[in-house]
Amino acid sequence: MLLKIIVLFFVFIAVLGFFGKMHWLGGKRLSQTKCKSCGRYRIGTSPCPCKKG
C-alpha cells in the first residue's frame, strides 16, 4: 500500500514537471518580461536597473 502511494506521488510530480516544461501556464509571458541586455526579469513598468547606470 505504501509503495503504491509513493509510485503515484512520483507519477504526479512527473506529470507536473512535463506540463511545466510545455510553457502553457504563463511561461511565454515570463520569457517576454526579461531584459534584452542582461536577462534579468523586469517587474512592473520601470526600466531594467542595468540601463539606469
Image (spheres, rainbow, N blue to C red):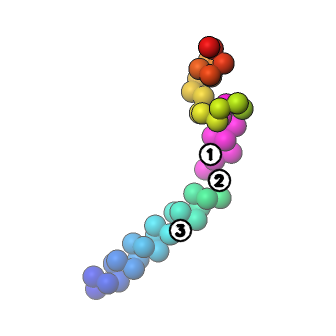
Q: Give the alpha-carbon distance from disc 3 to disc 1, as whole Å.
A: 17 Å
How many marks overall?
3
| Dot 2 amino acid type | His
The span picked out in magenta is 23-35
The residue indicated by pointer 1 is: 26
Tag 1: Cα neighbours inside 10 Å, few (<14), some, or many (≥20)? few
Q: Residue furthest left?
A: 2
Q: Earlier in the sequence, mark 3 or mark 1?
A: 3
User: Residue 47, how many percent across, how many down?
Assistant: 64, 19
Q: Give the alpha-carbon distance from disc 3 to disc 2, as whole Å.
A: 13 Å
The residue indicated by pointer 2 is: 23
The residue indicated by pointer 3 is: 15
User: Residue 45, how many percent across, how many down?
Assistant: 63, 20
Which corner quadrant of the image does residue 37 belong to?
A: top right
Q: Are marks 2 and 1 in contact (CB under 8 Å)?
A: yes
Q: Is residue 29 above or below residue 11?
A: above
